[in-house]
Image (spheres, coloured by chain):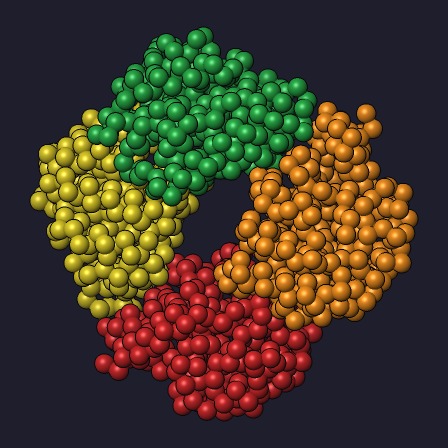
Chain colours: A red, B orange, C green, D yellow
Amino acid sequence: LKIEGIIPPLVTPFREDGRLDLPAFEANFDVYSEHGLGGYLVLGSNGEAAVLEEEEKLALVSLARARSDGRLVVAGTGLESTRATIALTLKAADRGADAALVLTPHYYKARMTPDALRRHFEAVAEASPIPILAYSVPAVTGLLWPVALSAALAEHPRIAGMKESSGDVGLLGRIVAAAPRSFRVICGSGPVLYPALCVGASAGILAVACCAPGPAVALYEAWKTGDHARARRIHEGLVPLATAVTSTYGVAGLKQAMTLAGFKGGQVRAPLLPVSAEASAELRDLLPQAEAAAVV
Amino acid sequence: LKIEGIIPPLVTPFREDGRLDLPAFEANFDVYSEHGLGGYLVLGSNGEAAVLEEEEKLALVSLARARSDGRLVVAGTGLESTRATIALTLKAADRGADAALVLTPHYYKARMTPDALRRHFEAVAEASPIPILAYSVPAVTGLLWPVALSAALAEHPRIAGMKESSGDVGLLGRIVAAAPRSFRVICGSGPVLYPALCVGASAGILAVACCAPGPAVALYEAWKTGDHARARRIHEGLVPLATAVTSTYGVAGLKQAMTLAGFKGGQVRAPLLPVSAEASAELRDLLPQAEAAAVV
Amino acid sequence: LKIEGIIPPLVTPFREDGRLDLPAFEANFDVYSEHGLGGYLVLGSNGEAAVLEEEEKLALVSLARARSDGRLVVAGTGLESTRATIALTLKAADRGADAALVLTPHYYKARMTPDALRRHFEAVAEASPIPILAYSVPAVTGLLWPVALSAALAEHPRIAGMKESSGDVGLLGRIVAAAPRSFRVICGSGPVLYPALCVGASAGILAVACCAPGPAVALYEAWKTGDHARARRIHEGLVPLATAVTSTYGVAGLKQAMTLAGFKGGQVRAPLLPVSAEASAELRDLLPQAEAAAVV
Amino acid sequence: LKIEGIIPPLVTPFREDGRLDLPAFEANFDVYSEHGLGGYLVLGSNGEAAVLEEEEKLALVSLARARSDGRLVVAGTGLESTRATIALTLKAADRGADAALVLTPHYYKARMTPDALRRHFEAVAEASPIPILAYSVPAVTGLLWPVALSAALAEHPRIAGMKESSGDVGLLGRIVAAAPRSFRVICGSGPVLYPALCVGASAGILAVACCAPGPAVALYEAWKTGDHARARRIHEGLVPLATAVTSTYGVAGLKQAMTLAGFKGGQVRAPLLPVSAEASAELRDLLPQAEAAAVV
């Protein structure tokens, strides 16, 4: 499984009445396809997978597959139970996903020992027809990733790597160092993409890539070609926007930034609330700043 | 809605192959019905609701209703999305639940402001035919309960109170003090039942009541009749077991303690793992200690 | 060492220019002496020991001894190094302190294992001519108290108990249960005094006792005589003030509440800042509410 | 004030009896002086300033000044009270310190608002004859650094920058971006030196530089000259040792690593404890690994 470059975690646009807006979801590919992206993630945290029904999820996988121009399609299939995760992974594979992103179960977080997590990921990988990627996002799960777990998981032929979304560059580097090179570590936090690449991340699945794919790809390319001065410049222009659409305003902020940038962001689903007018104004200012840094 | 006394959060026994064991679930009522309990909670955290399918959930509600001898049946119906929570609440009411326990949504925890939570609970209460109880359990959700939210929710005629499972007696007391008397605050942490009753909890939904219903009810009765010396004595005998079946060993520990006490605990569902033989031996020692304290 | 009842952690009044105001410190005893207090703590967190010079500390101990009417005088002598803590304990004993309150060292908090803490407390107790009390205050130190440490410390003849200021009633109860009865556990958090007494605290060292000694003593007496209805009523009246002068506004709030109540609070020392006018107005409202609850 | 390159936070060797070992402290300069270091920090966290008496501190400043060969000497002078910090800063300047490193006060951490911290640092800078550097180390203080504070402090002509020891590269980058270029941000965490340099740190004050100055300086030089491949290689060799002498084993681990590397580490002062034989064996293995990475 080749995982490289910048991969947007696609949002799921909803209509005002809360129903799925598949045409809006589809329309965004028209622009994304022009940007040299490394693939697409559907059903991630930014895709509001936590509030989607199974039939909605599968419709989104099918559509992403159809519109991906052969690029990588990763589908988020992690659920709290191992058996339910396996069932959804099989269905996502059936709809054409190239790989599954499996979130750490976290409801019973005090019980999610390294051993329990290892068994979970291995059981899913064992049953899955497609490669899986583990997904650690402590801001959601409250679980810190045990570094040694990566090395253990890397031994399974269908565990291809992980998405590391803590924003802790030191931790990401230790994970890279502890696992074999074949285990790909994907940076899941836009504000630290540049330093994460420096310490060994092989790709970025980043909210900011949904609303500003150009600068995100430009940063990756600059780093790839060894132009660190340019990479750092784009990084500095991108950080405020990347922070705003994640820790500051979350999915609703990302969707609003997408709408402001000409994409179809759509509504969020309750209990999420739309962002305020002030937040929207702030996002409107940050978008051109990110674009400008990549132009110079 | 009258919520008083001790309410066990019923476990969901699974067979070795991971399937639901409804006869085991049903058999436990034979003993519970002899204990002067205040009702039953089905589909709580200890009921492993997070790993149940919807059809399994509804079968459990129906069975609890049938076996409750007219006692209160509360069903856990909280999901991440508001619309899904409403849909499940309607179905649980249809199966005979007297009230719904609605967990705070928490996947997007950084966005779960007091306003977002209030809208969520009010939307569910507005659509629900039965009273609802909010459910705060920070060890699972990572969300601290905002004290002022209780007073706001109390204004809705179908929000009857909340289950407060932080184990923070000071917080529980502040919630009691901030809300009108009609808003019932239920202690969700066995190790602090006695001090929680002292500062105003009206009931206890406690894991330990699943494996040691006698001592739990005895503690409640002692407090109710003003026998604080006896209440504290039972409290001290119960705390080690109550701690073991929650923070130390979790649901798997509770199920094992139930099995050791003659109930049908059954297996846990993956990714949860069964407890070790050492843990089992420890639980075997703690059970009689809890029973003994209530006898004196 | 008899430690019972309510013990105010005396504040250290400063003049506008930052210098110690010993006459103000002394004047407060005129009122305290009328209240049936169990003794005095000098050089605690509320006494701003962290910003006092050694000669200032010793002057305060001497003055407290002189004005205590034979009541217990406890002096805070904990410093980061073991040898410095021993040296200060010896000097405090020489100035007449009956016991020393020894804060957990916490600068190197990741290294403060149960073993390191035990050696520290035992070394101080070994060298001290007076009994010592361990002092755990996680909001300051970031260290959670290991329950088993209490039982270990209780074996030393000059370690008389501890002040537990986490506000976690469950933890306080577990400490009481784990140690022999001779090891006294003192509640260090006013908002949970009542439930802490219920689970076994033998005394309270409480900021709120500095500005509202009457209600604090009344609550303790009500509990002592088994009048739980009255104890809970005073508790509810006292909690808002007790919360305001600790977690909400800290030492500066306590000093302002004292000044409003007719005591001599004096200024705080930088970097602490005085409270705002709004905070002062809030404190002015909370004081009579606390007094009223104890009158009924 | 020119702050560049690698600066070891000098340890303070103690004798077996706990007394200061000044000859050991002095001897380490013989080796350090050969390594192209950017200067020295005396009285930092690794210097055990928290357990030193004032006269000991001043003796160490004098000795560092005398042995520094004209390199920068920074002295840690932060104490809990503003007035005591000012007094110590004046004395350190008098003994020849070029700059003072001022730790955030943290005993009353809930009160250390951005405003309180700003006033503290400005008061010290105002009174100080030498430039000051703010010092944020959340693992010790429990205080997160407010990004906007850096920009505010940068306006004072004698606040030259800060030491940022959270290990959070994203935060360090945001601080760099928010402040003017004249405000130097020094990385205080060896395991993230390389990515921190990438996002704008201008120097590193790193425990690992005390026991492995060669590789630390080599990493800095590789980054400085744009040789990112070499920088990352040294980084990967250095991280395990840098982690071991900080978060894993702390000051005692650092001192033992120094002793193993031929420096004079000396003993720690109680309540710190020496490391175990197993820890020592681990450090013995990590030292050559760090050196080897810099040789290639």
Q: Quadrant location of the C terminus of chain B?
A: top right
Residue B152 is drawn in which quadrant? bottom right
Q: Is residue C75 left or right of C224 when viewed as pictured?
A: left
Residue B266 place in picture, x, y as percent? 80, 54
User: How many numbered discs?
Assistant: 0
Residue D62 is drawn in which quadrant? top left
Residue C150 place in picture, x, y as percent? 55, 26
In the foreground, B113 or A91: B113
Q: Is residue C120 visible?
A: no
Residue D12 place in picture, x, y as percent? 26, 34
Q: Is residue B145 left or right of C71 when viewed as pictured?
A: right
Q: Is residue A146 left or right of B232 when viewed as pictured?
A: left
In the foreground, B64 or D203: B64
Which residue: 29% across, 19% down? C22
In the foreground, D96 or C198: C198
Residue A272 place in picture, x, y as percent? 54, 68
Which residue: 39% across, 58% down? A170
